């Protein structure tokens, strides 16, 4: 049975008129009658009874018509899925990523993903988490790795948690911080809020004057040269290249000061096949990491 034969069966069952069905398939009525006879011979059953009033399907014919509908629906879904998969392999995924996540985590993740999906293309947009979250909401980027807890009409998966530290060249006493120069760097609102809350919980005096710099790794270089200290969240897999003194920060109740890193993506109904595959890859990697850690 060819696909056209299944289509003819389906069409005849819905409209048992030989002339109209023949015309819809650009065939003559005798040619259609011959095709129908060949189908009956192939299956060894009578598909239709021909009467002066027209065609009537036998029980075997009705069964075959039902199978025709199932088969054609299956072929349609299969073809569309394969086309979507082919298209997804050529799609570019626009990823928003915070500066430190891009530097310490993203390249390895994309490298591993590309090994399994060699046709996929990426565009990486690096920015502050505040700006990235706005880009996610307006669709400028497809997905995003964002530092801090943001709320909006998006799905999210926690992919990391980093600890806050006091970073100095040499060990210092916490009570001495208000009198020392603090190096400020660009960061997002959520990170700034957490660190300010910790400061206000521990000190009644404002932060001392210091040197504003661009990015956190510049701050680390300045601290190595003795320009002051900073408070920051250490990135995952942080390598202490400058041999700095790292002192973890704690809340008054003894719990560590931490910040979440989230993978944000659109609601499921808005996911393309390529995005869906990438989201599942990130989710699966997070599940495996939790299993290894026993969480």
Image (tube, rainbow, N blue to C red):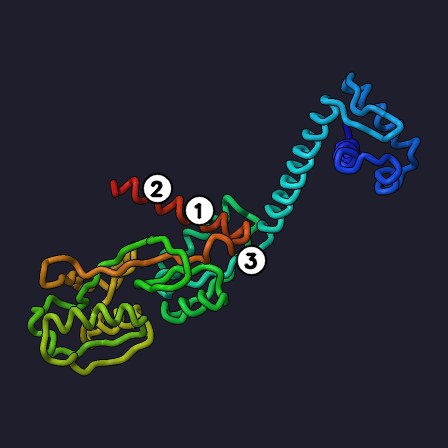
Question: Toward which corner of the image does residue 121 lie, by quadrant?
Answer: bottom right
Indicate which disc, 3 or 1, sits on the residue closer to the N terminus.
3
Instruction: Tell me how far mark 1 sits from mark 2, CA to CA.
Output: 11 Å
Q: Residue drawn 55% across and 57% down? A: 92
Label 2: state its secondary structure. Answer: helix
- Residue 217's disc number: none
Q: Around disc 3, counting alpha carbons within 10 Å, would you say few (fewer than 14), some (14 to 19), or many (20 or more)?
A: some
- What residue is pinned by disc 2? 288
Position of 47 with respect to 283 (left or right) is right
- What residue is pinned by disc 1? 281
Q: Residue drawn 93% across and 31% down? A: 30
Q: Position of residue 211 (x, y in %)?
A: 24, 80
Q: Around disc 1, counting alpha carbons within 10 Å, would you say few (fewer than 14), some (14 to 19), or many (20 or more)?
A: some
Question: Toward which corner of the image does residue 36 lie, by quadrant?
Answer: top right
Position of 127 with respect to 60 (left or right) is left
- What residue is pinned by disc 3? 92
Q: Residue drawn 37% across and 66% down? A: 99
Q: Quadrant of the N terminus?
A: top right
């Amino acid at each position: 049975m060819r696909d056209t034969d299944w289509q003819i069966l389906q069409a005849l069952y819905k409209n048992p008129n030989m002339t109209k069905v023949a015309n819809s398939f650009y065939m003559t009525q005798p040619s259609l009658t011959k095709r129908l006879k060949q189908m009956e011979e192939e299956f060894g059953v009578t598909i239709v009874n021909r009467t002066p009033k027209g065609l009537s399907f036998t029980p075997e014919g009705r069964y075959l018509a039902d199978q025709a509908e199932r088969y054609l629906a299956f072929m349609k879904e299969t073809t569309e899925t394969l086309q979507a998969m082919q298209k997804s392999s050529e799609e570019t995924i626009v990823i928003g990523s915070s500066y430190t996540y891009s530097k310490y985590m993203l390249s390895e993740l994309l490298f591993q993903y590309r090994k399994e999906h060699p046709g996929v293309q990426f565009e990486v947009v690096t920015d502050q988490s505040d700006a990235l979250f706005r880009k996610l909401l307006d669709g400028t980027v497809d997905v995003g790795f964002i530092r801090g807890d943001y709320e909006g009409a998006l799905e999210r998966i926690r992919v990391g948690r980093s600890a806050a530290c006091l970073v100095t060249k040499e060990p210092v006493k916490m009570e001495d911080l208000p009198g020392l120069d603090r190096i400020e760097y660009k960061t997002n609102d959520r990170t700034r809020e957490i660190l300010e809350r910790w400061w206000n919980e521990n000190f009644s005096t404002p932060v001392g004057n210091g040197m504003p710099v661009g990015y956190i790794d510049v701050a680390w270089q300045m601290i190595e040269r003795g320009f002051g200290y900073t408070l920051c969240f250490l990135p995952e897999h942080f390598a202490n290249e400058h041999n700095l003194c790292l002192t973890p920060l704690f809340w008054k109740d003894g719990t560590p000061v931490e910040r979440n890193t989230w993978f944000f993506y659109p609601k499921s109904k808005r996911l393309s096949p390529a995005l869906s595959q990438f989201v599942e890859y990130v989710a699966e990697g997070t599940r495996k990491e939790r299993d290894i850690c026993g969480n």
